[in-house]
Structures are given as structure tokens and as C-alpha cells.
Image: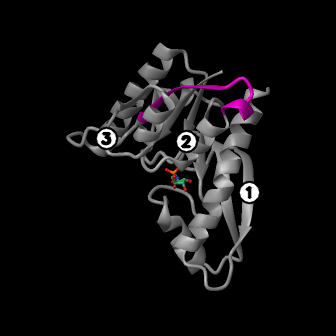
Amino acid sequence: MKILILVSGNGTNLQALIDAQNLIGNGRITAIISDRADAYALKRALSAGIPAFVEAPDRNLPKTERRLDLSNRILHHAQDMGIDLIVYAGFLSILSGDLINAFAGRMINIHPSLLPKFGGEGMFGNKVHVAALAAGETESGCTVHFVDAGTDTGPIILQRRVPVIPGDTPETLAERIHKEEHIAIVEAVAKIGSV
Ligand code: GAR
């Protein structure tokens, strides 16, 4: 199973997958694409000797066309490389178009909340934890789900839960969830790789 990982930032979820290569069934990380040239995740890819490159959104295009253009570029790479599974590992662009159909059931995302709570466009990173705390949640967690044409709406593969502790800040909650994400993303890829 050839895996393409999409990243935007620090890449700790990518690192969890790199470190768990032996746990992810017959999966092999074939390439990494970042939508940001300054993503630290690119350095992690370099250290691990995994081919990585940047496909940035074209800021000159209007939103819908911009998403489609990036999606089509990623689709072409995935097809060229014979990719079986695409993993959004802290990937913040929203993709659309033919890619969604071509990789239906073969493209997954990790999100730092118990979806369907605190998902959707604009809900990423710290904003998710700010919203969970503002809503007075007593627990939160992370979700790995298949990507569909919506944002954070596809079928759920697995979730891991953590308590919200009195005095939590978005940062302390994020840190607790991040640890669970690193387990969840490996489990989800292993689960897909074993079927
Ligand atoms: C993770 O918490 C991931 O769930 C989140 O971005 C962070 C990336 O961390 N993704 C989203 O919010 C997607 N909507 P990482 O770069 O250290 O893996």
C-alpha cells in the first residue's frame, strides 16, 4: 500500500507515522506533499529520506478555482506515483473535484475533536480547542475519518477521547489530544492496511 501524506505545519502526526512504519501493515510512506514551503514537516521528511515537495495554493485564483487547482495537482501526483492511500496529517487546505471521487474510501483526515463536534470550514488547530472549552465540554479527543466532499463530514474510522480538566487552556487540551492523535493516526492507517 503506497501512502501519500499531506501536511501543512509541524508534522508531529507525520512523525508518528514515520516512527511506526513497522506498525502500519503493508503500508509504505511513498511521498509527502506540503501546501506550505515553510512547513517543519518538510524537514522531518528530509531527515527520514522520504521524497517531499511543495504544492502551494495559487493565491491569484478565486477560492473555488484555487481549491480545484491544488486538488488536481495533488491528484496528478497521486496517480503518477500509483498511490493507494492519501493521509491528511495536519493538512489545512480543503480539497475538491475529481480527487474526492478518485480517492473515495482511500483518503483519510485527522481532526482534533470528537466529530461531528467542532468540525467544518475554519475549524482547525487551536480554534477547535477554544471552541470545545467555550462550549463547556467535559471531554474532547480526536477523530480519523474518510474524506468526502464536505469538510470533516466523512465516515468515522476511529476516535480517541480525553477528559477536559478544570483549568485547561486551549494549549493544555491541545497537548493532551495531540498525544492521542499520534496513536489514532497510526491505528487508522494500520486498520486500512490490514484489509
Ligand atoms: C493536528 O492537531 C491535527 O489534528 C490538526 O492540525 C494539527 C497538526 O499537527 N488538523 C486540523 O485541525 C484539520 N482540520 P501536526 O502538524 O503536529 O501533525
Q: In terms of secondary structure, where does tag 2 sit?
A: helix
Q: Which residue is mark 3?
A: 37
Residue 160, numbered label: 1
Q: Residue furthest left?
A: 60
Q: Quick check: 34 above or below 28?
A: below
Q: Residue visible at 48% across and 27% down?
A: 49
Q: Label 3 to label 2, Cα distance in Å? A: 16 Å
Q: Which quadrant of the figure has residue 160? A: bottom right
Which region is colored magenta?
Answer: 21-33
191 horizontally vs 164: left or right: right
Q: Is residue 30 magenta?
A: yes
The mark that comes first in sequence, 2 or 1, is 2
Q: Is residue 29 magenta?
A: yes
Sequence-first tag of 1 and 3? 3
Quickly name the residue at label 2.
14
Which disc number belongs to residue 5? none
Type of the residue with mark 1: Arg
Distance from disc 1 to disc 3, alpha carbons, whole Å, reads 31 Å
